[in-house]
Image (cartoon, helix red, strand yellow):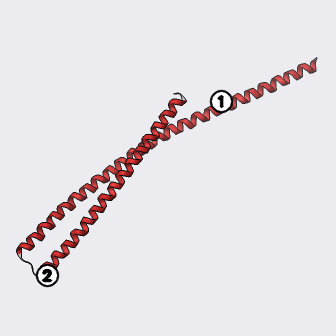
Amino acid sequence: MSSSQLEMLTDLAQQARDQAGQTLAQERQSEQQTNAQLEALTRYRAEYSERFQAAMRQGIDPASMYNYQQFLASLDTALARARQALGEQHQRVEQSQEHWRQQQRKLSSYDTLTARRLREAQQRRSRQEQKSNDDFVNSRTARRSSETSH
């Protein structure tokens, strides 16, 4: 694989990781919103239940009692749906988080490969420099010995 191909793969992996990060952030934000809605609905249900209890203590006609009970039942249904939605959203967050981790691992592997190639190239250059220096010293030594023998 050439350096340009590796750079291209690294760039693509970084873009994929960044996109996965954006998706994860959006999913987390949706989870927070869903949780806030569930909390608001829970508070509203508690308040409405307190009103119903107060009305019961003061005396309430059967039609009003039926209406309170029906509305509380519909709130309970809404709460069950909201809890389910929060659970599903939490799963989407976990899936997005795992996808981001996979993309990060892929990017890290390309970064590791790039670093290894750079290290190997540096080692080759160092060996070539050392060989050139050794050749220069050897030829200089050979010249000196041939000059002194003449």
Q: From the image, which quarter does the C terminus lie in?
A: top right
Q: Position of residue 137 (x, y in %)?
A: 81, 27
What residue sits right under mark 1 in the picture? 124
Q: Residue furthest left?
A: 62
Q: Residue furthest top?
A: 150
Quadrant hosting residue 65: bottom left
Dot 1 falls on a residue whose secondary structure is helix
Work out whether 135 lies above or below 72.
above
Marks 1 and 2, Cα distance to the nearest angstrom? Answer: 90 Å
Q: Residue at point 55% right, 36% down?
A: 114
Quadrant hosting residue 115: top right
Q: Residue at point 22% right, 73% down?
A: 47
Tag in front: 1 or 2 = 2
Q: Position of residue 7 (x, y in %)?
A: 52, 34
Dot 2 falls on a residue whose secondary structure is helix
Work out whether 60 lies above or below 114.
below
